[in-house]
């Protein structure tokens, strides 16, 4: 079958609601982060300068390290009756308040073709708000710590 375009809405982002360091060998408890309408996976790299006189004025380098980040945006979700928050959003916010080892959580990103990537990430929760006629916005920057891993589920 030929490759086809996929809609961004087909991706599923989940967070492990069990603290990363409490049960490092335990089974993750994955919960979807709902209310998303945008996600962007970005890459960065740091180069090591390797230029010598032998390069006759041409700069040379090699990649010394790489980084990944996942930006997500959407809408703030809350039950209007009892105030219960979307568990995925609430977990992301809790991780975003932590410092030290507790500031890292496990995430799972599943493609529309069911290809799964897992990673450990810190969180910076974005601005929450909006104007008079707007639904309340919600978002986060997930800065990945270490390598992204492909898994089979």
Image (spheres, rainbow, N blue to C red):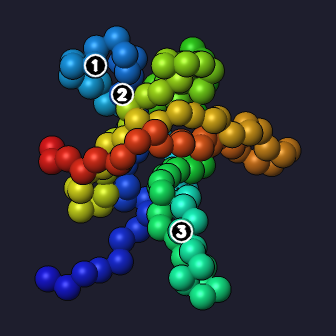
| Residue closest to the eye, 149 or 80 | 149
Instruction: Please name the residue that numbered disc 2 is placed on.
Output: 16
Q: Is residue 27 left or right of residue 77?
A: left
Q: Earlier in the sequence, mark 2 or mark 1?
A: 2
Q: Please, is residue 6 above or below residue 14 in the view?
A: below
Q: Would you identify the image quadrant in which residue 82 lies?
A: top right
At x 64%, y 86%, the residue is 57
* Distance in Å between CA atoms under marks 3 and 2: 41 Å
Q: Which mark is residue 24?
A: 1
Q: Please, is residue 61 above or below residue 42 in the view?
A: below
* Distance in Å between CA atoms under marks 2 and 1: 11 Å
Identify the secondary structure beneath mark 2. strand
Instruction: Please name the residue that numbered disc 3 is placed on.
Output: 50
User: Dot 3, crowdedness within 10 Å: few (<14), some or many (≥20)?
Assistant: few
Q: Are marks 2 and 1 in contact (CB under 8 Å)?
A: no
Q: Which mark is residue 73?
A: none
């Amino acid at each position: 079958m030929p490759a086809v375009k996929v809609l961004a809405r087909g991706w599923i982002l989940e967070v492990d609601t069990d603290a990363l360091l409490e049960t490092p060998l335990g089974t993750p408890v994955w919960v979807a982060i709902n209310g998303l309408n945008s996600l962007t996976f970005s890459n960065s790299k740091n180069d090591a300068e390797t230029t010598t006189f032998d390069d006759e004025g041409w700069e040379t380098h090699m990649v010394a390290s790489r980084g990944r980040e996942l930006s997500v945006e959407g809408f703030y979700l809350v039950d209007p009756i009892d105030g219960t928050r979307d568990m995925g959003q609430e977990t992301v916010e809790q991780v975003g308040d932590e410092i030290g080892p507790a500031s890292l959580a496990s995430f799972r990103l599943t493609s529309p073709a069911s290809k799964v990537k897992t990673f450990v990430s810190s969180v910076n929760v974005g601005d929450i708000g909006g104007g008079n006629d707007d639904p309340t916005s919600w978002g986060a920057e997930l800065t990945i710590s270490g390598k992204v891993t492909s898994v089979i589920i």
